[in-house]
Amino acid sequence: MLTRLLAALVGLAVLLPALVWGGEVAVEIIVPVVAALCVLEYAGMAFPDDRVVASVFTLLGLGVVYVAALYVPDAPVAWLAAVVLVATLIFVTLRPGASLERAADKVGRYLVGMGWIGLLAFLPLLRRLELGLAWVFMVLVISWLGDTGAYFAGRFFGKRKLYPRVSPKKTWAGAVGGVVAAVLGAFVVRAVGVPSLGVLETALLAAVLCVFGILGDLGESLLKRAFSVKDSGWIMPGHGGLLDRIDSLLFVAPLLYGYLVWVRG
């Protein structure tokens, strides 16, 4: 647990100053770097015998839609996503591997990697909104305090398993502890950065987003079991890989963005 705590503190010591004083530029730089590292981790899990080629192709497909969505005004993102799908089918057709029976699985693995990691694009989109820094912190707090609260609540009070087939260590007590921690953290962000957010709205928003964060965590656990690996990587001692740290965030960020843009206005 000490290794886990030290790794988290080192990561926060680097990340927090960059987010606070680096402005939008910091997020625009950090997110693509994190995405690239996550692609390397994903390729290592999904394509262990072809990770270099898989990393390059996944990065290219992800990069096309990511750059268009964030930096090209009025870009036909849906059309570019269709192009990436067609390119993936062509790529696997030309490099199907030894087993043709697994070709469809190979296509799916590429598309899941591109789409899943591509959800990181919602962090810079959130940062560009009014009070964007506060919304980015809202995502981080709900995701990471939710994970932390779940870890400690599950460790000390967890008995009944949440979903043992996919994640044997997660418990219902951990899930409740995660939601409580996420809600408390959201109120801190509200007090500092978004006081216009209502009390009930803050509580409900944090609770719902934390639940989806837990589902994001379970989703990554499912993929790791499908790929027969314990951790996505090794870059964060005590935590595993970057994907192990941001799996909740990948679900929370797009949902918060959608709420702010299309519900809250």
Image: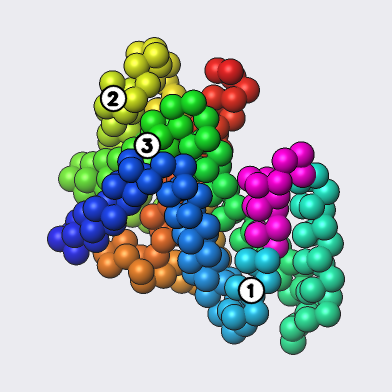
Give left or right: position of 111 versus 192. Answer: right
Magenta segment main secondary structure? helix
| Residue depicted at x 79% and y 52% | 80
Q: Secondary structure at mark 3?
A: helix
Up-down relation of residue 253 to residue 134 (above or below): below
Task: Compare marks 2 and 1 and give the one earlier in the sequence.
Answer: 1
**Residue that numbered label 3 is attached to:** 137
Decide whether residue 62 is among the magenta residues.
Answer: yes
Of the 4 image quadrants, the one containing the N terminus is bottom left
Label 3 crowding class (10 Å Cα cut-off): few <14, some 14-19, many 20+? many
Of 225 and 254, which appears nearest the observer? 254
The residue tagged 1 is 56
| Spatial CA span between label 2 and label 3 | 10 Å
Q: CA distance from mark 2 to mark 1?
A: 41 Å
Q: Look at the image and say whether residue 181 sits in the magenta stretch.
A: no
Residue 161 in sight in this render: no
Q: Give the residue at x 37% y 21%.
A: 194
Camera-side residue of 57 and 251: 57
Q: Specify the segment rendered in magenta.
A: 61-75
Q: Which quarter of the figure has residue 50?
A: bottom right
Residue 192, disc: 2
What percent of the width, then of the height, locates residue 153? 23, 41
